[in-house]
Amino acid sequence: MTSSRLPAILIALAVVLLLIYSSVFVVNAKEQAIVLRFGQIRAVKTEPGLYFKLPFAFMDADRVQYIQRQELRFDLDNIRVQVSGGKFYEVDAFVVYKIMDARKFRETVSGDRDAAESRLRTRLDAALRRVYGLRNFEAALSNERASMMTEVRDDLHRDAETLGLNIEDVRIRRTDLTQEVSQQTYDRMKAERLAEAELIRARGNEEGQRRRAVADRQVVEIVADAQKDSEVLRGEGEAERNGIFADASSRDPKFYEFYRSMAAYNKALAAGTGSKTLVLPPNKSDFFKYFDSPTGSTPNSGAPASANPAPSAN
């Protein structure tokens, strides 16, 4: 009798265990749970623990949908925004958010993260365009970008609340000029640098010409001063030489006459050093009066030799 009841007892025990298993669900610290009964929200469990529901989820009796409660993130890339000056940027941004109201999140997007993020992307795109459109070209790259992100977050926060979400942070990962604007900016910067180089080169040439003119003027002044000094020194030398000659002439007129004649001979004869023969006129002039006097005296006291003969060379 007992052995015949054993299978029934085991079956009953298995059914009880199955009922208990299908009636229990666990919520951990990283998630929250929505209990749905016939598609309607029956309860929302936000605290970690063990909870009960109706067994078996057939016919949509009781079903549990788990919603994450940690921070989530989505990215938006290559958003084309226009600043107030008419130029365009390409912006990469990301949003960090949390599901704060699981009930509202289920009611608005059926608990679908992709649907929620799609709506946030649309709103983020519009917010970025609006905020960037109020700024000029330089502001988007300056410290003002932090306040711009605050405006975007505030715009996004209003839509996020309707989805049961809370926007934790909005950040810009990259802000670049578009390819066309980058090329225009590069060309403009290149033209500015070339113009600046030409200006520097022109100033350098002007300064070089000025310095060369100053140097040339200084050279002329130095040469003129040197010539003036040389003329003065030459004049002083001539005066001193004439004084010496005058003094010598007054002390010994005959010797001075002899000295001057010898100097004249040396100068005249040196002009014909390339000739082998020197022809003298038969009637000697006073220029050669010392040739007939081995002692250097003259037969008469005529004027000293002062003219150069024209020796003939054969």
Image (cartoon, rainbow, N blue to C red):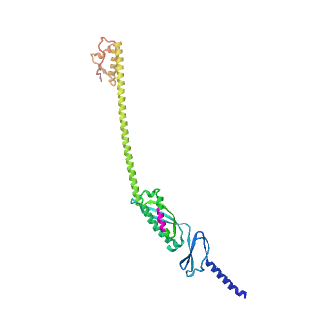
Tell me, yes or no, whether the highlighted magenta stretch contains residue 301: no
Name which quarter of the figure residue 122 lies in.
bottom left
Task: Give the total number of marks visible in the rendering.
Answer: 0
Range covered by the magenta-colored residues: 151-159
Name which quarter of the figure residue 47 lies in.
bottom right
Name which quarter of the figure residue 11 lies in.
bottom right
Spot occupied by residue 95 in the image (x, y as percentages of width and height):
50, 65
Where is the C terminus found, in terms of image quarters? top left
Residue found farthest to the top:
299
Identified at 36% across, 29% down, the residue is 225
Spot occupied by residue 311 in the image (x, y as percentages of width and height):
29, 21
Is 241 placed above or below 41 here? Answer: above
Spot occupied by residue 160 in the image (x, y as percentages of width and height):
49, 68
In the foreground, 57 or 303: 57
- Left or right of residue 89: residue 9: right
- Left or right of residue 287: residue 204: right
In the foreground, 313 or 186: 186
- Left or right of residue 291: residue 104: right
Spot occupied by residue 290 in the image (x, y as percentages of width and height):
32, 14
In the foreground, 314 or 62: 62
Instruction: Label the magenta part by its dominant secondary structure.
Output: helix
Tell me, yes or no, whether the highlighted magenta stretch contains residue 154: yes
In the foreground, 203 or 168: 168
Is 150 placed above or below 47 here? Answer: above
Identified at 43% across, 63% down, the residue is 130
Identified at 44% across, 57% down, the residue is 139
Identified at 35% across, 15% down, the residue is 247
Residue 278 appears in the picture as rendered: yes
